[in-house]
Structures are given as structure tokens and as C-alpha cells.
Image (tube, grey):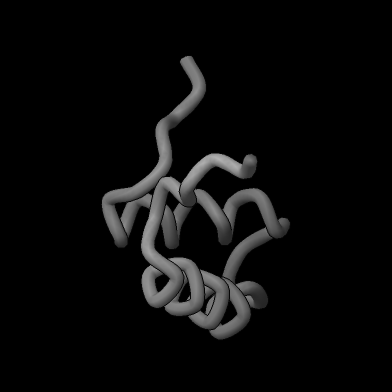
């Protein structure tokens, strides 16, 4: 049985849309992903 998602579907959809919108503002996709995650208060930074 699959485990439940950590984040609601709507939040994930919003995050994907936001990354697509800001991708060209960052040097790479990872930077764009991290910026959106920080903005939405999701994910965890690697230390």
C-alpha cells in the first residue's frame, strides 16, 4: 500500500506552477526549486 502524500495535491500543483514561472530567473532548476520551497515553507534544506 502506498504511503499518503506528505503535502496536499493543491500545494504540490501550486509549487510546480511556481517553479515553471520562475525557472528562468535562477541559474539552474535546483535553485528555482529551493527558492519556491522556501517561499512556500515546505521541504527541508540539506545540512
Q: State left or right for residue 26 relative to residue 41.
A: right
In this view of the protein, which residue sits in the foreground, 14 or 25? 14
Indicate the position of residue 13 as horizontal and vertical percent values.
50, 77
Q: Is residue 45 above or below residue 7?
A: above
Q: State left or right for residue 40 relative to residue 3.
A: left
Q: Which residue appears at 72% of the width and 57% of the height?
A: 28
Q: Residue furthest right?
A: 28
Indicate the position of residue 23 as horizontal and vertical percent values.
63, 73
Quarter of the view holding residue 20 = bottom right
Q: Is residue 45 above or below residue 23?
A: above
Q: Which residue appears at 31% of the width and 60% of the height?
A: 39
Number of labels in the image equals 0
Q: Quadrant of the N terminus?
A: top right
Q: Which residue appears at 54% of the width and 40% of the height?
A: 3
Q: Residue furthest top?
A: 47
Indicate the position of residue 5 as horizontal and vertical percent values.
48, 51
Indicate the position of residue 34 as horizontal and vertical percent values.
50, 49
In this view of the protein, which residue sits in the foreground, 13 or 1? 1
In this view of the protein, which residue sits in the foreground, 28 or 36? 36
Q: State left or right for residue 11 relative to residue 21.
A: left
Q: Is residue 27 above or below residue 1?
A: below
Q: Which residue appears at 37% of the width and 64% of the height?
A: 8
Amino acid at each position: 500500500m502506498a504511503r499518503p502524500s506528505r503535502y496536499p495535491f493543491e500545494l504540490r500543483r501550486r509549487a510546480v506552477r511556481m517553479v515553471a514561472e520562475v525557472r528562468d530567473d535562477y541559474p539552474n532548476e535546483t535553485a528555482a526549486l529551493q527558492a519556491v520551497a522556501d517561499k512556500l515553507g515546505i521541504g527541508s534544506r540539506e545540512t
